[in-house]
Image (cartoon, rainbow, N blue to C red):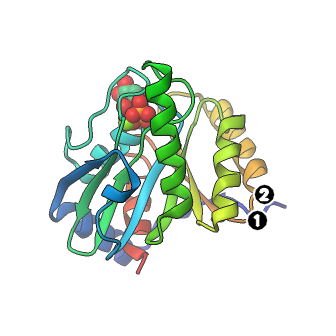
C-alpha cells in the first residue's frame, strides 16, 4: 500500500484556525521579476507552483475569498512575475508563473521560467511549495522535473489537484492514483494530497488549515 493518501478533513479547531487566517488581512505586496527584488526573508511563505493554466491564481483567489486578488485568466501564461501577497502579519502567499506552454514570446517565457526555478531552489523561507496538478490529467513529465528540482533543494512540496469539479469520479480516481505513484518517487513530497476546486470550494478548508498549521 502507498503511504500517500488524500488529506483528511481538518478537525474543527484546525479548520477554524485556517478560516480565521484567510478571513483576515490579505494584500498584494509586489510583483518580482528578479531574485534580488524578493522581499526580505523575514517570515514563512508558501507558494503555488504548477503548469500554466492549472489554476494557481484562481486558487489563491478562492482561498482568500477575494475574486480578483491574483490575476487569473484562460490564457496560459497570465502570471508573469513572482507575486507576493501578505497573509496576516506572519506569512506570505506566493503566486508563481506557470511552467510548460505559455502564450508569450519565447525569450520572455525563458526568463520567467529561470526566475521561477531559481525561486523554488533558493528561497530560504519557502516553507512548503504547493504543486498544483490538473485533476483531469494527473502529473506530466514537466511536473516531475519540478519535483526533482524540489527534491534536490530539499523543499517540501505538497500535491494539490485542481479543477476537481471537471472530471468524472473514475477519471478523478485515476488522477489521484497517478499522483500518488509519482509522489512515491520523490523524497521531498509531503505524504498527503489535497483535492480542490476553486469553483465548488472543495478542499479549500483543508488547504487553509494546512497553511495555518505551518509554524
Ligand atoms: P498561469 O498564471 O497562466 O500559469 O495560470 P494559473 O495556473 O494561474 O491559472 P488561472 O488561475 O489563471 O486559471 C486558468 C483557467 O482555469 C481560468 O480560466 C480559470 O477560470 C480556470 N479554473 C481555475 N480553477 C478552476 C477550477 O477549480 N474549476 C474550473 N472549472 N476551472 C478553473
Ligand atoms: Mg496565474
Q: Is residue 112 left or right of residue 33?
A: right
Helix or strand or loop: what does disc 2 sit on? loop
Residue appearing at x 78%, y 57% in the figure = 184
Residue appearing at x 44%, y 19% in the figure = 105
Label 2 vs 1, first from the N-terminus: 1
Q: Quadrant of residue 86?
A: bottom left
User: Where does the image place residue 47, in percent across and percent down from the top left?
Assistant: 43, 56
User: Where does the image place residue 96, in percent across and percent down from the top left?
Assistant: 41, 45
Residue appearing at x 26%, y 41% in the figure = 70
Which quadrant would the N terminus be assigned to in this image?
A: bottom right
Q: In this view, does 34 lie above or below 138?
A: below
The number of discs equals: 2
Residue that carries the numbered disc 1 in the rendered image: 3
Front residue of 94 and 180: 94
Where's ligand 2: which quadrant? Answer: top left
Q: Within 8 Å: ligand 1 and the Cβ of disc 1?
A: no
Residue that carries the numbered disc 2 in the rendered image: 184
Tell me, yes or no, whether the two marked residues, 2 and 1, touch with CB atoms within 8 Å: yes
Q: Is residue 188 left or right of residue 45?
A: right
Q: Is residue 58 left or right of residue 20?
A: right
Q: Quadrant of residue 158?
A: bottom right
Amino acid at each position: 500500500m502507498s503511504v500517500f493518501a488524500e488529506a483528511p478533513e481538518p478537525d474543527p479547531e484546525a479548520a477554524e484556525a485556517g478560516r480565521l487566517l484567510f478571513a483576515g488581512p490579505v494584500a498584494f505586496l509586489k510583483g518580482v521579476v528578479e531574485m534580488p527584488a524578493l522581499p526580505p526573508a523575514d517570515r514563512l511563505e508558501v507558494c503555488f507552483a504548477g503548469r500554466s493554466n492549472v489554476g494557481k491564481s484562481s486558487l489563491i483567489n478562492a482561498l482568500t475569498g477575494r475574486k480578483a486578488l491574483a490575476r487569473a485568466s484562460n490564457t496560459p501564461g497570465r502570471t508573469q512575475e513572482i507575486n507576493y501577497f501578505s497573509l496576516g502579519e506572519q506569512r506570505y502567499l506566493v503566486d508563481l508563473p506557470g511552467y510548460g506552454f505559455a502564450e508569450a514570446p519565447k525569450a520572455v517565457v525563458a526568463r520567467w521560467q529561470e526566475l521561477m526555478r531559481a525561486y523554488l531552489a533558493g528561497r530560504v523561507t519557502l516553507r512548503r511549495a504547493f504543486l498544483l496538478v490538473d485533476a483531469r490529467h494527473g502529473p506530466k513529465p514537466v511536473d516531475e522535473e519540478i519535483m526533482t528540482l524540489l527534491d534536490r533543494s530539499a523543499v517540501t512540496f505538497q500535491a494539490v489537484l485542481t479543477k476537481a469539479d471537471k472530471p468524472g469520479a473514475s477519471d478523478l480516481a485515476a488522477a489521484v492514483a497517478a499522483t500518488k505513484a509519482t509522489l512515491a518517487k520523490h523524497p521531498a513530497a509531503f505524504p498527503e494530497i489535497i483535492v480542490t476546486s476553486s469553483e465548488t470550494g472543495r478542499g479549500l478548508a483543508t488547504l487553509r488549515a494546512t497553511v495555518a498549521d505551518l509554524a
